[in-house]
Amino acid sequence: MAGTGPHEVVVIGGGYAGLTAAARIGETASGVSLTLIDTKPEFVERIRLHEMAGGSTPRALPYEDFMTARHGRFVQAKVMSIDPGRRRVLIETDHKGQSEVAYDTLIYAPGSYTDRQTVPGADRHAVCLDMADGSAALYARLTGLARTGARTGGTVLIAGGGLTAIEAACEFGERMTDLRIILAPGRNFAPGTKPGDLSKAGFDHVIATLERLGVEIAAGARIARVQPDHVDMEDGSTIAFDVCLWAAGFLVPPLAADAGIEVTQSGQIVTDETLTSVSHPDILAVGDAAHVMTEIAGKCRMSCAAGRPMGEGAARTFDARLNGARPDAFTFGYSFRCISLGREDGLIQFVDATDQPVEEVWTGKRGAVWKEYICRRALAGVGFDNDLGPPPNVPPDTPPEIS
């Protein structure tokens, strides 16, 4: 990696994975010119977007200040394409039009977005929890609906049976009691299945909490089409709504595939054990848009739990290569899944290293307190907070160390 000038590092995407990588490189590497590119001006706590849609106020976490403090720069722009042969990234800004950014090492971390393409009509008639401004707009719509009267006055349909859908349903059910909340998990809640790969104890607590909060569950059939004011189910039935929130799967941007970088069928960059692209050694891929296999965990799922450690791993790989050393393999294993079930309830579902649930769970206030701590710990791990303090005092046990 030796050169006559500073080594140009470009990071695409300022989520948990990309910003962690940028932070560690900026804090430790010398002789490096570091650039972060993202379409939005500040970091968004994606794991809190359902809270924002429920009325919580997000923190202001500007990229520019963050990067300046770490000897880097931030460029607010949309990445239009990548030219791996010339090592250039084509970007477009609102005021300056299109331009190119050169790199010696590219860290690819554009993240993922809600899949509203698979089911007809979802892209036109459903909203999602991908961005802070979208969550704020959804909150405004929900509060407007709530003012129309009792539960029969406004209906919110939440499509999906995973953790995002469950968290949103509980958040709205607790904080917006005038609304009718319907969760449509498809076949996720069918007999013999459990949402989010939960244990029986975890699944039972989720169901009990949804029922306690008055959330209706329309399980069994999948949504076949989204219409302006209702969904058509695959069994021929319909469900009317005033607002449809789509939380059923994720997609990754096509940037890497369009650039000729080796990707999976879903568009994730295929990496080796050091998070390096198998087809382009000057590209490291992390987060949701990376296909990462580890000896312990196996394939890393799309999650903050895996994404932030990937960012740390990419920074270590870069540092080793910058100094002429052989990078170590990225190692990772799971400990637990955490789910918010409103502000006063939560679920810590313990899992083995391969992400398979075990029977131990923490629920209720204990689960809520630890879920909040984990969210704060994730933000501190990126580098925004240095005064996190000790874990909450919820005896008798504590979970394993949180990355």
Image (cartoon, rainbow, N blue to C red):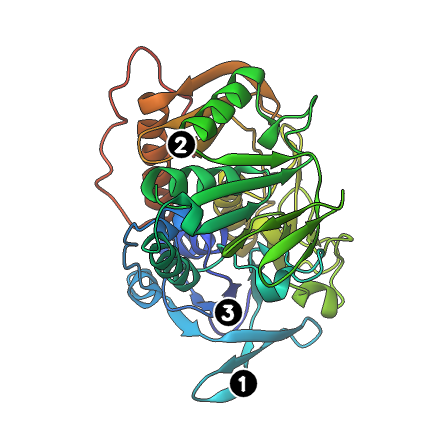
Q: As shown in the figure, which amino acid type bears the numbered disc 3? A: Glu
On the rendered structure, is 385 left or right of 280?
left
Identify residue for label 1. 99
The residue shown at (33%, 55%) is 143
Instruction: Kindly report the distance in space between the C-alpha atoms of the residues bearing marks 1 and 3.
Output: 16 Å
On the rendered structure, is 372 left or right of 389?
right
Residue 24 position within the rendered picture, expressed as x and y whole percent measured from the top left: 41, 51
Residue 102 position within the rendered picture, expressed as x and y whole percent measured from the top left: 56, 76
Q: Secondary structure at mark 1?
A: strand
Identify residue for label 3. 8
Quarter holding residue 200: top right
Quadrant containing the N terminus in the rendered view:
bottom right
Few, some or many C-alpha atoms within 10 Å of disc 3 (few <14, some 14-19, many ≥20)?
A: some
On the rendered structure, is 159 left or right of 7?
right
Examine the rendered structure and indicate whether residue 363 appears above or below residue 105. above
Cβ atoms under marks 1 and 2 closer than 8 Å: no
Q: Which of the numbered marks, if any, corresponds to residue 213?
A: 2
Q: Secondary structure at mark 2?
A: loop
